[in-house]
Image: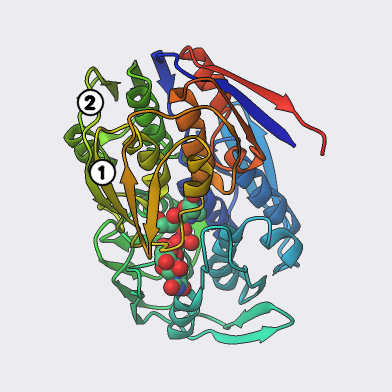
Amino acid sequence: MDKFIIQGGRRLRGEVAVSGAKNATLPIMAACLLADGDCRLLGAPDVTDVRHLSVLLEELGVEVRREEEGLCLRVINRENSHARYDLVRKMRASVCVLGPLLAARGCARVAMPGGCAIGPRPIDIHLRGLEALGAEIDLKSGDIIVKAKRLKGAEIFLGGPFGSTVTGTANIMMAATLAEGRTVIECAACEPEIVDLANFLNAMGARITGAGAPRMTIEGVDNLQGITHRVIPDRIEAGTFMIAAAITNGEVKISGARLDHMMAVVDKLRQIGVIIEADDGGAIVSSRRGITPSDVTTQPYPGFPTDLQAQLMALLCLAGGNSIVTEKIYPDRFMHISEMARMGANIRKEGPTALVLGAGRLVGAPVMAGDLRASAALVLAGLAAEGTTTISRVYHIDRGYERIEEKLAALGADIKRISEKE
Ligand code: EPU
């Protein structure tokens, strides 16, 4: 297992390019199950989650090739529709094959994903949606079995206790593309990744309107064709680099950042003293004065994303005062607090809220990555800390960031990857 060693205190300067969005790429890869012919996904990032889904799709009869500009996928065999637990447990987003498998093959068997480091993550809303489209649902040996000769359009409400569901919306939207008649999804997720999936499906021949708004309509069609599509830039990676620039008092051009996908993030960072200027297909981010404390609550898009909560918390540790961070999507997503405490952070958690007592400084320490975004937060903390930070188990960060240490080193960070035998 690899670890990162970071010597903190270097100001980041220069330009970094944002990769394609992991969370757009995963459901779009699954949507290739619906297509006849080659699908080319330009900009699909080479991260472990994408590799895991490639292995699963290969088992499901999809040929997946890494090409210079991204991925090429093509269905070559429709016999196996069983997503095994061994593969699904490595990445719970694998559940995004459920809707397209069912629509394309009339049946699917997908291992029920368990919880994960950020808390319980049920899929009840996905199943309710598929049932509304006419699927029969059964649970056998931990696998969900769904069947339907042909799905039928329906009116479906996808709201849950924490708002809509992103992957649930993707699953129902993909299933409904080949259903008979019209499907209306109410309380659909509005994330840019959902809009990207809808654009991909429409280019393949689907008829989806309203993506990006809570009410979406899908008119079923008979078949879909392979196409070439460029995946949107990763707004979470872009946000992570914005915070990296701010936390090191640096000045970084983030090329490819879509500020229109990041308004809540840009607004919050500006509020606390980070300077963000739009610049020719990206942004220039700098910080010349201290960070001011603030309150932030994570929400479904267009609110502040849960996937940047840990990284923002690292920055707020350096503020001259107290901040309040409330997690409204995953109330238990605070694994980073105890690791940051090892670096001198003073954070008190009370239910889904954390009180960050800004101490103005962090100190290097050996820490352990616990999940993808928590690991990114530890890297950011390490960049700002006095002395050496060693982060073990960085396979978590490789799940969603493409060569993060190389990108940071190119900006002047002192960060090294060491292969660690355990
Ligand atoms: N929920 C339910 N029932 C369901 C589905 C979800 O109660 O059937 C709850 C969840 O437990 C959670 C909330 O609804 O409290 C939102 O979950 P959602 O389904 O929207 O999350 P997801 O689709 O599983 C995606 C991203 C996550 C990101 C969340 C929220 C992908 C592959 N994953 O997960 O990304 O945190 O949306 O924005 O798109 C990450 O990249 O680090 C990551 C965890």
Seen in the picture, residue 413 relative to 389 is either above or below; the reply is: above
**Helix, strand or loop status at disc 2:** strand
Looking at this view, is 245 or 314 the one in front? 314
Instruction: Spot the residue most to the right.
Output: 421
Q: Of helix, strand and loop, which one carries label 1?
A: strand
Callout 1 amino acid? Asn
Q: How far apart are marks 2 and 1 (CA)?
A: 23 Å
Going by the numbered disc 2, the residue's amino acid type is: Ile
Q: Residue at x 34, y 68 (%)?
A: 164
- Neighbor class of circle 2 (other Cα within 10 Å; few <14, some 14-19, many 20+) is many
Q: In which quarter of the image is residue 318?
A: top left
Q: In this view, does 207 lie to the left or right of 373?
A: left
The residue positioned 47% from the left and 21% from the top of the image is 386
Q: Which of 221 and 308 is in front in this view?
A: 308
Residue that badge 2 annotates = 276
Residue at 29%, 54% (x, y): give it.
301
Residue drawn at x 77%, y 31% as measured from the top left? 420
Image region (quadrant) for ligand 1: bottom left
**Residue behind mark 1:** 322
In the image, taking residue 328 as reference, residue 83 lies left or right, namely right
